Amino acid sequence: MEKTYRIGWLLLLLVVLPLAGKAEDLGAQLRKVIEGKAATVGVAVIFNGSELVTVNDMYRYPMMSTYKFHQALSVVDYINREKETLATEILVKQSDMKTEMYSPMHDANRKGNFYITIGDLLKYSLIDSDNHACDILFDYIGGPKTTDKYVRSLGITDFSITQTERDMHESTDNVWLNWTKPSAAALLLETFLQNPMFDKNQKFFLERAMADASTGKDKLKAGLPDDVLLGHKTGSSDRNEYGIKVADNDIGFVVLPNGQYYTIAVFVMNSQETDKTNARLIADISKVVYNYFVAHYKK
């Protein structure tokens, strides 16, 4: 099921329009890519800041670590309100990292009790998808509710963020409580790129961190030419007791050498496919969208 929308700019209101022929063609191509896959796949793409095309956007997809992008925006908003900066240092105690979960920061600082800047925590979270860095940032700003409230203040509603990384590691059921529709993720990316939310240095800092992401090189990135810039945030779950991958995701913005761009969100849910197949599926979607963009929008 694909839809075409126009985005009312300031309020980000979605108004349903009849399907344009070219958008319908893109929807058909995307449906062909996901056809026969033992998974539910949702896609949302915004072209030129105005046209939103979606497939399977009616479902709530577990966000996993893609919500670290949402968190990063709320962290920068928080430090601005508190008259602090990305260079502000906070103390990380050993007790802050007692939960066993993926964390290059913890690996480099096993004893804990060290100072680190907010900027470096954001780099760990966005670039390396560091779970302890994410939770320390949540503790710093007042928890997931602060991120949820901030994103809603931007006019985006089809999502929910209530769980920390610790929460999600305590129970696999909790991963379902951080959810989004693909369109909401693409709209947040678009809002970040187009609205003057932060000063230019803060915006560039976040863009650069997403462009430097060390995860997901076989996902959206694998579907793009080498000279095309991708800034993105991935998210991935473990498999449940039945061998099902709850979520395998990638969201980001794609910038062509001529400066044109689009935003894209791909969520794979309840997949019985292998991790390699999931990644290839996201890469194939990325390639289809890129080729469509070049054919219809590139000047």
Image: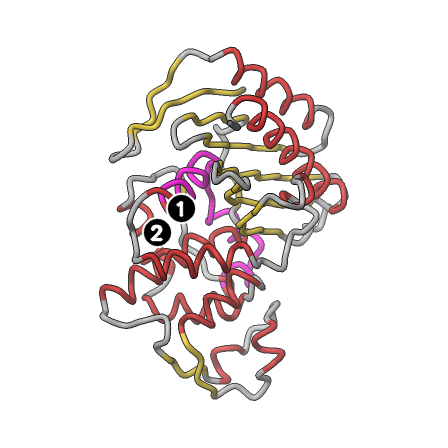
Q: CA distance from mark 2 to mark 1?
A: 6 Å
- Disc number for residue 148: 2
Q: Main secondary structure of the magenta part?
A: helix
> Secondary structure beneath disc 2?
helix
The residue located at (49%, 25%) in the rendering is 53
Whole-percent x and y of residue 138? 40, 65
Q: Earlier in the sequence, mark 2 or mark 1?
A: 2
Label 1 crowd (10 A; few <14 / some 14-19 / many >=20): many
- Please check the rendered image and state whether residue 180 is part of the magenta-colored stretch, yes or no: yes
Q: Are marks 2 and 1 in contact (CB under 8 Å)?
A: yes
Say what amino acid the circle numbered 1 marks. Answer: Ser
Say what amino acid the circle numbered 2 marks. Answer: Asp
> Secondary structure beneath disc 1?
strand
Quadrant into which the N terminus falls: top right
Q: Is residue 163 left or right of residue 64?
A: left
The residue located at (76%, 45%) in the rendering is 276
**Residue denoted by label 1:** 160
Q: Is residue 126 above or below residue 269?
A: below
In the image, the segment drawn in magenta is 167-191
